[in-house]
Amino acid sequence: MSARELVVLGTASQVPSRHRNHNGYLLRWDGEGILFDPGEGTQRQMLRAGVAAHDINRICVTHFHGDHSLGLAGVIQRINLDRVPHPVTAHYPASGQRFFDRLRYATAYRETVRLTEAPVAADGPLATGPSYSLDAVRLSHPVESYGYRLTEPDGRRMLPALLAEHGIKGPDVGRIQRDGQLGGVTLDQVSEERRGQRFAFVMDTRLCDGVYALAEGCDMLVIESTFLDEEALLAAEHGHLTAGQAARAAHEAGVRHLVLTHFSQRYNDPEAFERQARDAGFDGELTVAADLLRVPLPKRHPLKP
């Protein structure tokens, strides 16, 4: 199993359908799990997808429409029921604090886990750790909505052929990584710069500066495409994107892997979204999301000189 992958729990816009649950997405990032937009039924979808409450370290809610947040009550209670051994942090628009409070305490249960509330009130950083930094950017929707972006720090990739050429092996590999040189050989001579991975999550929004800021240079962009291009006016009126709009934004931002999701119940042909995305000029890796799909992040690329 990939150490970094997207587990799709639900892909429906507004209401679930026979084949699509409300939204829900778990990003596995090394040993951490980030749950995005748990809509109604997320707890059951987790069971079907092999995702446990113990896998969740952070919850990120883009906005408080039901298809993106009604599952919070069940997920939070399950985290406590299973006595998850680590603290969990929840991010959500600060303007929706009353909705978060109602969902968190929708029914009686015993709290056993420390859940840290970290509401989002403006664009900017939310968390920084050794394997990623997390930022939020405001989007354009009838209610306050934020997208989220993970950025891994740039690093270095050790090159086995060059290590062997300089006779560096075993514990000496760790020493040169730590000290920057060993016996007259520098780290630059046996490694190359490695670009950190970038992931963005963009839900309900019209086209706006925030979409492009979140998508810029991403290895994977998960983005709503509620409508096909024929309904562009309807999409703008309700604060949504079409498949073509999402794909053009991804193309202009240099996205490597585009994941389209959040589909209106009026459509039953997933291939139509793929066709419109390709027609819009996106030529990278493309996934039209389906419930319970697992999508690995692309492998890292060396930094260009």
Image (spheres, rainbow, N blue to C red):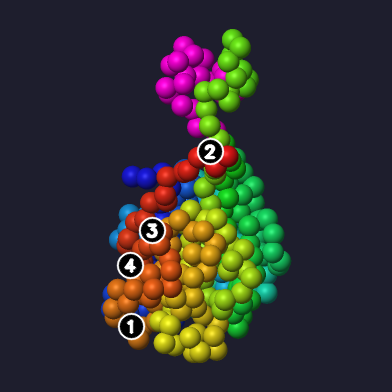
Secondary element at image label 3: strand
Label 3 CA crowd tier, 10 Å (few <14, some 14–19, many 20+):
few
**Extent of the magenta region:** 156-178
* In the displayed structure image, the side of residue 278 where residue 97 appears, left or right: right
* In the displayed structure image, the side of residue 67 where residue 126 appears, left or right: right
In space, the residues marked 1 and 2 are separated at their CA atoms by: 41 Å
Secondary element at image label 4: loop
Amino acid at the residue labelled 2: Arg
Given contact means CB atoms under 8 Å apart, are the residues at marks 2 and 3 in contact?
A: no
Task: Report the residue marked by disc 4.
Answer: 290
Q: Residue at x 67, y 70 (%)?
A: 94
In space, the residues marked 2 and 3 are separated at their CA atoms by: 21 Å
In the rendered structure, does residue 175 fall within the stretch colored magenta?
Answer: yes
Which tag, 4 or 1, sits closer to the chain's start? 1
Give the vertical position of 30 relative to 202 (above or below). above
Task: Report the residue marked by disc 2.
Answer: 194
Q: Residue at x 46, y 43 (%)?
A: 300
Q: Position of residue 293 (x, y in %)?
A: 32, 60
In space, the residues marked 2 and 4 are separated at their CA atoms by: 31 Å
Secondary element at image label 2: strand
The N terminus: image quadrant: top left
Which numbered dot is residue 267?
1
